[in-house]
Image: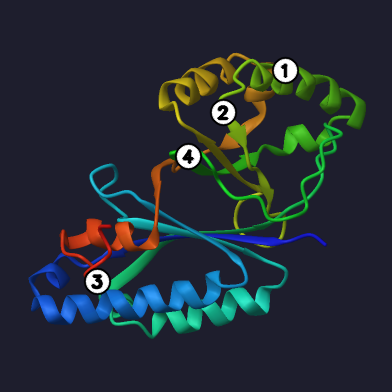
Amino acid sequence: MRHFVKYTFIKVDPAWRRLDPAQRLADKEEFLAACEDFGSDHLLQAFTTVGIRGDCDLMISVECENLERIHEFGVVLNQSGLMKWSTVPYAYLGMRKGSEYSDEVRYEPRPFKGDFVFVYPFVKNREWYGMEADERWRIMQEHIQVGKEYPAVDNHTIYSFGLDDQEFVVAFDTNDPGAFMDLVHRLRTTEASAYTERDTPSFTCIRTSVERALIALDGDPVSADALA
């Protein structure tokens, strides 16, 4: 069964950090409880962007078998005190799907394992889809081969055709941000790159627990053992 994937980027109002510590703790505990409930039987991972981007503070990635569950999670998350002080400047939805350019099939949930995750929406121009399938396959083989030259960087691309504004959501994880930067630099030289319509904004995220992502918002613990 193909699974849905959702990346939600959250920005917290700076005024929230001026609230009483007890209120901030309660707000974070509600957010954490919603994530723990969903994560008990579905894949949920947290990432912090504090100090890296100015337009978002954390990202939650979830993966499950249907849209209804993603919707329900969003409803519960919005009921938390923290979300009452937050906006969602970016959110990307997609599905797992086998690539027409590779034999590799990845339908099941697959967690990020690297310390760093890089996410961006991706759209190809219409000229790309006007080419014969064999020609597109030929061009993509160079693109795929370049990716294989960077084994420390793992690809987690999902498909969004008709589901969201972009055609793909591209995500990579690695322990070496420099290797990812070098990979993207090299990919700019491939023939396939000429058919890119859009591949921004690009998010650099640090993989962490939900607790630590929440601690990064104000520096205060979520619970007594949160820093253990």
* 41 and 161: which is toward the camera: 41
Write down the quadrant of residue 129 in the picture. Answer: top right
Secondary structure state at the residue bearing disc 3 = loop
Q: Spatial distance from mark 3 to mark 2, Cα to Cα?
A: 34 Å
Q: Which mark is residue 223?
A: 3
* 22 and 97: which is toward the camera: 22
Secondary structure state at the residue bearing disc 1 = helix
Could you say where residue 177 lies in the image, as x and y percent from the top left?
42, 27
Q: Are marks 4 and 3 in contact (CB under 8 Å)?
A: no
Q: Is residue 187 left or right of residue 56?
A: right
Q: Which mark is residue 145?
A: 1
Callout in the foreground (1, 3): 3
Comes first in the chain, label 4 or label 3? 4
In the image, residue 171 sits, relative to residue 223, either above or below, namely above
Could you say where residue 105 lies in the image, as x and y percent from the top left?
82, 43
- Disc 4 residue type (three-letter): Phe
- Disc 3 residue type (three-letter): Ser
Secondary structure state at the residue bearing disc 2 = loop
Could you say where residue 228 lies in the image, as x and y percent from the top left?
28, 57
- Residue at image point 83% right, 32% down: 102
- Disc 2 residue type (three-letter): Val
Q: Identify the residue under disc 4.
A: 118
Comes first in the chain, label 3 or label 2? 2
Q: Which mark is residue 153?
A: 2
Secondary structure state at the residue bearing disc 4 = strand
Q: Is residue 64 left or right of residue 183?
A: right
- Residue at image point 45% right, 23% down: 181
Q: Spatial distance from mark 2 to mark 1, Cα to Cα?
A: 13 Å
Comes first in the chain, label 1 or label 3? 1
Comes first in the chain, label 4 or label 1? 4
Q: Spatial distance from mark 4 to mark 3, Cα to Cα?
A: 29 Å
